Amino acid sequence: MNNIFPVIISVPEKERALKGKDLVASLSDFARKGLLISAKKFGTKLTGELLKDENGAPVPVNGIFWSLSHKPEYAAGVAATYPIGIDIEKIRTYKEALKKKVAHQNEWDLGGDEPSEVLFFRYWTAKESVLKATGQGLKGLSSCRILDVPDKKSMIIDSMNRKWIVEHFYFDDYIASIVKDEYDIIWSVL
């Protein structure tokens, strides 16, 4: 099977109203529901506890890699047979100082004429998805480089001396990015 099935779930209003640890726990539950649906669509079932290693990276379950992401309005999960990463963000204004932390000027020059908010969150979510797939987390941000932006739905990133293909998906003022490689991505928003 050459398809990956990321699942994005809309978080109900009453859950969005939660605060602090209760909100985080609820969002995590929704992301895990998305993961279980993704695994089922992929043709497998994740059994057992979903654990993370000492760096906070998800530990594969019976050879199935997984990744989660969530924001107050949406949660996402994905299962795959290769190291996978997914990230979602709302496209919004950002602090200009963050731009230099996310990418170098030569990387920004690859973005063309796309609106700055969209481009910023494309870069951010793409790098975050790769950093999740590599297990580095944000500590690897400075060594994760955008090599090419062939179109508005994909980019190629270098991290840990490997090229990663990332696909973008736009929905409801949000962007989701996922490590694609040679797989076809079939998105679901529930």
Image (cartoon, rainbow, N blue to C red):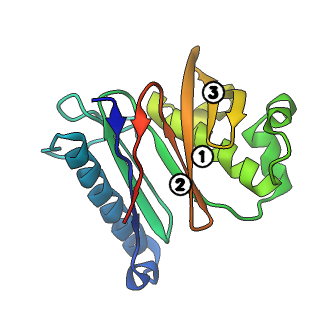
Determine whether label 3 and label 1 are within 8 Å by CB: no
Horizontal side, residue 44 vs residue 77: left or right: left
| Mark 3 or mark 2, earlier in chain | 2
x and y percent of residue 172 in the render? 57, 68
x and y percent of residue 13 in the render? 43, 83
Q: Which amino acid, mark 2? A: Ile
Badge 3 is on which residue? 157
| Mark 3 or mark 1, earlier in chain | 1
Determine whether label 3 and label 2 are within 8 Å by CB: no
Quadrant placement of the N terminus: top left
Badge 1 is on which residue? 125
Badge 2 is on which residue? 88
Mark 3: secondary structure? strand
Residue 91 sits in which quadrant? bottom right
Q: Which amino acid, mark 3? A: Ile
| Mark 1 or mark 2, earlier in chain | 2
Q: In this view, does 25 lie above or below 180?
A: below
Q: Distance between the residues labelled 1 and 2?
A: 6 Å
Q: How far apart are marks 3 and 2 (CA)?
A: 17 Å
Quadrant placement of the C terminus: bottom left
- Crowd tier of the residue under label 3, counting other residues whose Cα lies within 10 Å: few below 14, some 14–19, many 20 or above: many
Mark 1: secondary structure? helix
- Foreground residue among 101 and 163: 163
Q: Which amino acid, mark 1? A: Thr
Residue 174 sits in which quadrant? bottom right
x and y percent of residue 99 in the render? 80, 46
- Crowd tier of the residue under label 1, counting other residues whose Cα lies within 10 Å: few below 14, some 14–19, many 20 or above: many
